Image (cartoon, rainbow, N blue to C red):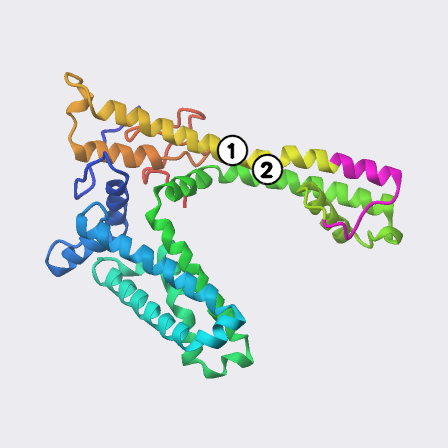
């Protein structure tokens, strides 16, 4: 039933740290250079478990936060009128800094195209493109307000997500729960459609429910307990339906939170169990495995997800899902 374990990834890194796991994933995805200046740059830029890498990450985090502060302050008319020239100089400084960082990332990996098309690669492009576009396309104001391009710089805040392991855990949990969440959203849409149509029939155009889409808008604002008050039921039956929608909204809002929380809990439990089986005690046969083999198991345990039922946490050598029995894909079954 079980196939032999796959060979461990190269290079072998310590499985005891989350930074090492992320570095191993980046090495597999983007290609780690073999030596020379590219390897030295790679260790500084992509491997945050080294002293130089930590200093680079901390400096970059401060630069990102400072650039966001500049964008926010520049949007204040009084500050922009007085300090606009300084904001412009600072913006160009941050743009050149992030451009150099992006170019360095592409120069020190073997598969730069894959990085450019990745989530972080697109965020890096969004962090520098607005400044250049506003200069390279002088007539852009005829098509779109330049302020929109300036606001796109706020996407630099997403560059911080690569430095937070909790963000990685949340993204993995949401990806593993995507089918359950989609089913839940489908149920919500059905309730909104049914209740909106019912209110359109009960209240009618004279009370503001001029069409089914308008009534569905009311159903969404009521179910999410926002209740703008621009459309309110006037009949007793309509108020009864609105009351049921409000009560239903309390329960509906808790469902996606529970789904993602349960998935994160399952991943944390799986990680703790793996850490207990691969480290610590002496005389245990499992603790005799090499660090590279433990890291290989950790990567597959976190990311091997059944594509049939979305069940996570399968061991590295498992061929079939322990929940539904479906055959696991050979590529690890990581969510796309």
Image-based side of 180 in relation to 107, left or right: right
Question: What is the secondary structure assignment of the residue under circle 2?
Answer: helix
| Residue 80 percent across, percent down from the top left | 48, 73
Picture quarter containing residue 284? top left
Query: What label sits on residue 184 in the rendered view?
Result: 2
Which range is magenta?
Answer: 228-244
| Residue 65 percent across, percent down from the top left | 38, 58
Residue 6 seen in the current view: no
| Residue 137 percent across, percent down from the top left | 44, 80
Q: Residue at x 38, y 70 (%)?
A: 91
| Quadrant (top left, top right, bottom left, bottom right) of the N terminus | top left
Q: Residue at x 83, y 53 (%)?
A: 208
Give the class, few, some or many, for how many residues have Cα within 10 Å of label 2's Cα (few <14, many ≥20): some
Q: Is residue 26 magenta?
A: no
Give the class, few, some or many, for how many residues have Cα within 10 Å of label 1's Cα (few <14, many ≥20): some
| Residue 157 percent across, percent down from the top left | 41, 56
């Amino acid at each position: 039933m079980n196939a032999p374990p796959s060979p461990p990834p190269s290079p072998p890194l310590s499985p005891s740290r989350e930074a090492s796991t992320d570095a191993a994933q980046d090495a597999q995805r983007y290609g780690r250079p073999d030596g020379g200046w590219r390897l030295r740059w790679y260790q500084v830029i992509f491997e945050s478990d080294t002293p130089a890498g930590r200093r680079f990450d901390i400096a970059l985090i401060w630069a990102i936060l400072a650039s966001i502060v500049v964008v926010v302050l520049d949007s204040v008319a009084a500050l922009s009128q007085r300090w606009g020239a300084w904001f412009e100089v600072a913006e160009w400084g941050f743009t050149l800094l992030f451009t150099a960082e992006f170019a360095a990332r592409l120069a020190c990996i073997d598969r730069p195209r894959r990085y450019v098309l990745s989530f972080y690669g697109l965020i890096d492009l969004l962090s520098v493109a607005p400044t250049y576009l506003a200069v390279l396309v002088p007539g852009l104001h005829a098509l779109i307000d330049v302020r929109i391009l300036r606001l796109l710089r706020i996407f630099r805040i997403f560059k911080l997500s690569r430095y937070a392991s909790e963000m990685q855990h949340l993204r993995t949990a949401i990806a593993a729960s995507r089918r359950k969440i989609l089913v839940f959203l489908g149920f919500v849409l059905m309730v909104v459609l049914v209740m909106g149509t019912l209110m359109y029939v009960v209240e009618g155009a004279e009370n503001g429910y001029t069409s089914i889409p308008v009534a569905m808008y009311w159903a969404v604002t009521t179910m999410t307990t926002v209740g703008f008050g621009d459309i309110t039921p006037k009949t007793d039956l309509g108020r009864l339906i609105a009351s049921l929608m409000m009560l239903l909204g309390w329960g509906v809002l808790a469902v996606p939170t529970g789904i993602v929380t349960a998935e994160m809990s399952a991943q944390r439990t799986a990680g703790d169990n793996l850490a207990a089986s691969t480290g610590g005690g002496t005389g245990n046969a499992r603790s005799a495995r090499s660090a590279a083999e433990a890291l290989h198991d950790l990567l597959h345990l976190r990311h091997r997800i059944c594509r049939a039922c979305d069940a996570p946490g399968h061991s590295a050598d498992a061929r079939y899902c322990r929940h539904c029995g479906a055959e696991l894909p050979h590529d690890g079954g990581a969510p796309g």
